[in-house]
Amino acid sequence: MTPSFIDTHAHLDDEQFDSIRDQVVERASLAGVSKVICIGTTAAASVKCVELAEQYASVHAAVGIQPNYCAEAVDGDWDQVVTLAGNPQVVALGETGLDRYWDHTPFEMQQDYFDRHLRLSKSSGLPFVVHMRDCGEDVYAMLVDARARGPLHGVMHSFTGDADLAQRCVELGLYISFAGMVTYKKSEELRAVARGIPAERLLIETDSPYLSPHPHRGQRPNEPALVVHTAACLADVRGISLGELAALTTANAEALFFSGRAC
């Protein structure tokens, strides 16, 4: 039986796809990618993600304001995200989280918006999608605070942290997702982290149009069909077949995003 994959994080709304989106969705299907989650980064992008989910049967939407865009948000943007969260095409909130690498948004504002997404996750039952760059302990501290309010349902997207942080996030109830970086020649430490993630907490993604996996590194844009290469790398690292890796990550994605709202 042909393996089936779910790309849990793709920015199909990106303008790089505007002239080729039909072909990209078709290539994903031909590659065995049964579902793609289109991730919002702004209120406007979130609207487009929902529109794409309404247009393509295999596409589903996440809505939110990414930390680097919080400073650009205007009155009404967050309210729009809250409204969109009630749309039946929406399966997650985000991406949200924190970022100390770029200096586009004051850190306190990032924390405020991250907290909004975490609270909306609890009230709506939707899982959240966490962006984390150069701020693992800051993210973890906010997740611990949120866990005190109740169970967490979410994923650490395109994870690049160490094994200790991954384990602590798993203990909070989160999933860990890997993108194309895990396939790169110099990513031995990240592959070691991926090897140790509990099978029931592992997810795969492309983060397209970014982070094309080996052997397509440098290809622009990355696209959901290429998630198969990340899956193959993880299967090799974990000593299982591609079919087994596909089955467990698909089951995990179904459990987190498609099994009904948690509340």
Image (spheres, helix red, strand yellow):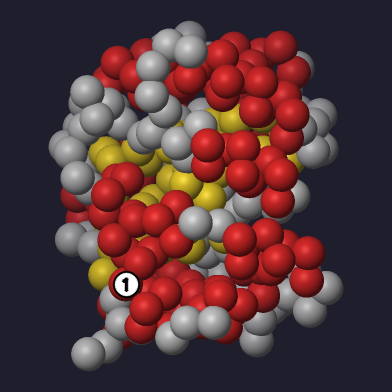
Disc 1 residue crowd, few under 14, some 14–19, many 20+, Cα 10 Å: some
Name which quarter of the figure residue 221 lies in: bottom right
Location of residue 51 with respect to 188 vertically, above or below: above
State how many labels appear. 1
Q: In this view, does 7 lie to the left or right of 3?
A: right
Q: Which of 72 and 176 is in front in this view?
A: 176
Location of residue 159 with respect to 171 vertically, above or below: below
Name which quarter of the figure residue 22 lies in: bottom left
Return the residue found at the far bottom.
1
Location of residue 189 with respect to 82 vertically, above or below: below
Location of residue 157 with respect to 132 vertically, above or below: below
* The N terminus lies in quadrant: bottom left
Q: Position of residue 158 (x, y in %)?
A: 60, 53
Name the secondary structure under disc 1: helix
Q: What residue lies at 29% left-to-right and 46% top-to-bottom?
A: 257
Can residue 207 be seen? Answer: no
Can residue 246 be seen? Answer: yes
Q: What residue lies at 21% left-to-right and 32% top-to-bottom?
A: 261
Label 1 belongs to which residue? Answer: 247
- The amino acid marked with disc number 1 is Ala
Q: Nearer the viewer, residue 13 or 138?
A: 138
Q: Position of residue 196 (x, y in %)?
A: 61, 61
Q: In this view, does 109 lie to the left or right of 258?
A: right
Q: In this view, does 177 lie to the left or right of 181?
A: left
Q: What residue lies at 67% left-to-right and 75% top-to-bottom?
A: 183
Q: Which of 44 and 191 is in front in this view?
A: 191
Q: What residue lies at 71% left-to-right and 12% top-to-bottom?
A: 108
Q: Where is residue 144 in the image (x, y as percent from the top left)?
A: 57, 20
* The C terminus lies in quadrant: top left
